[in-house]
Amino acid sequence: MLEKSQQGGLSPDESLVDELVARGRNAQSDFERNATQERYDQAALAAAWALMEPSRNQELATMAVETTGLGNVEDKIIKNHRKTLGVLRDIRHSRTCGVISDDPTTGITEIARPLGVIGAVVPSTNPVATPTNNVINGLKCGNAIILSPSPKGAAVCEKLIGYMHAEFDKVGVDRDLVQMIPSPVSKDKAQRLMEAADLLVVTGSQNNVHRAYSSGTPAIGVGAGNVTVIIDETADLKDAAEKITASKTFDNSTSCSSENALVVVDEVFDSFVAELQEAGGRLLEGSEGEKLKEALFGGGQLNRAMLAQDIDKVIDASGVDVSDPSGARFLLVEGKGVGPEYPESGEKLSLVSTLYRARDFEHAKNLAAELFAHVGAGHSVGLHSSVNDRALELGRELPTCRVIVNQAHCFATGGSFDNGMPFSLSMGCGSWGGNSIDQNFNHKHLMNITKVVRTIPTSEPNLDDIFGDYWKRAGQ
């Protein structure tokens, strides 16, 4: 791969990052020079087993919660296992090395080529699953990868890479193919990585995404989540309540795909609230609801003492009175409106959802559009309904890249073993979310395709073939 030019007068932090990139570039060049599909696959499997080995998964999940203070250990173990297994399923039969297609009809042969050194910025919410996902996808396509963890996630990321390197040693993979910015992690180091890498993959804060896009390096960023789920009058209310509860509470709502707003059609509103109550949702009305909002949003930003915390900590931090607290799994507040003056209408990253009452499906759709216009455009919308055409209606009319139908949203959006979405922890939001991709980030985004083009029999239409129908309507 071509090296980027070096600037003089670098700071120690910038020089350190440049050294990492140089080592990664050397390792990647050797990886590509001696490339076989088996070699790429073995490297990806080694990185995956570094996490999936049960005792290591347990250790890393525990460490992630202890160091970041976010999520819960049991769910992180499940997430680490299922997300990694799902990515391995997705890439298992993909050709990413050498000739991947040869079409005599078009005369085009396609050759997969690595991108080079990938810089990956990963969030504190998923400090183990996300970097593993990135590394597997990167190695599958012959790349080196350098991780830039969040400060809180740096220690567990370092531990993860140590296990990866131990697995690499077993199968002869160069350790320099996977590195991380060493602690203390800083914006200056992350910025230098953004400038020096060949491609950036950025998951997490929108500030990081915007910095990546302005770094001068091609970047794949993902948009903000603020998932809205519509429950219409034809929905299976019990099933919807159980799935929403399971999704919303998973890993204490660290996922960008957790349900932030529930928009319920008036005809079934009371019945659905009753089903939510049964499933563990607790609607706080009146002064208790206002107390919860003040605790979560007071001071103009989310209360970190409530972010991705267990439900008992959320209740204690807000000081609210909850009915049957022992059975509570998450809390709901009434949505009074949408926009900056209604903070409950944004993303919450906590065991709190906002409940809106809609007159009918048309009104529910309009509310979802308002919520997208505020935060989360392009990400995804959920629908619990028995009317198939309504999902297509949402897909045609809302600024969303995904319509998740009758599923637990956070399990379905990033890929599931019972749907066809690629497994991923990074969801592109298209032009609506200011992103370069509208898909779940996956290995296909981490390779170049070289086309060998040969001649084929001439296929040139005449003007009548092209314009005939148009001329009949409009004249020549």
Image: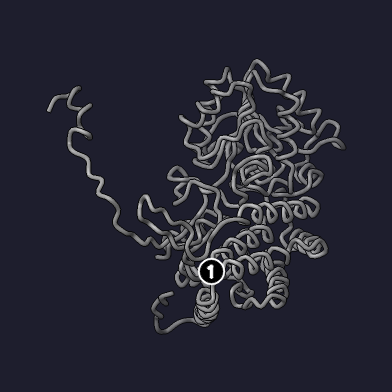
Quarter holding the N terminus is bottom left
Amino acid type, callout 1:
Asn
Residue 133, position as x, y percentages in the image: 63, 59
- Classify residue 123 as left or right of residue 400: right
Answer with the quarter of the image where residue 454 lies: bottom left
Q: Is residue 54 above or below residue 254?
A: below
> Residue placed at 53% from the left, 34% from the top?
371
* Any part of residue 21 in sight: no
- Classify residue 313 as left or right of residue 449: right
Which residue is at the front of the view, 105 or 333?
105
Residue 320, position as x, y percentages in the image: 78, 37
Which residue is at the front of the view, 108 or 246?
108
> Residue placed at 56% from the left, 30% from the top?
337
> Residue placed at 80% from the left, 33% from the top?
280
Which residue position is annotated with label 1? 143
> Residue placed at 54% from the left, 53% from the top?
441
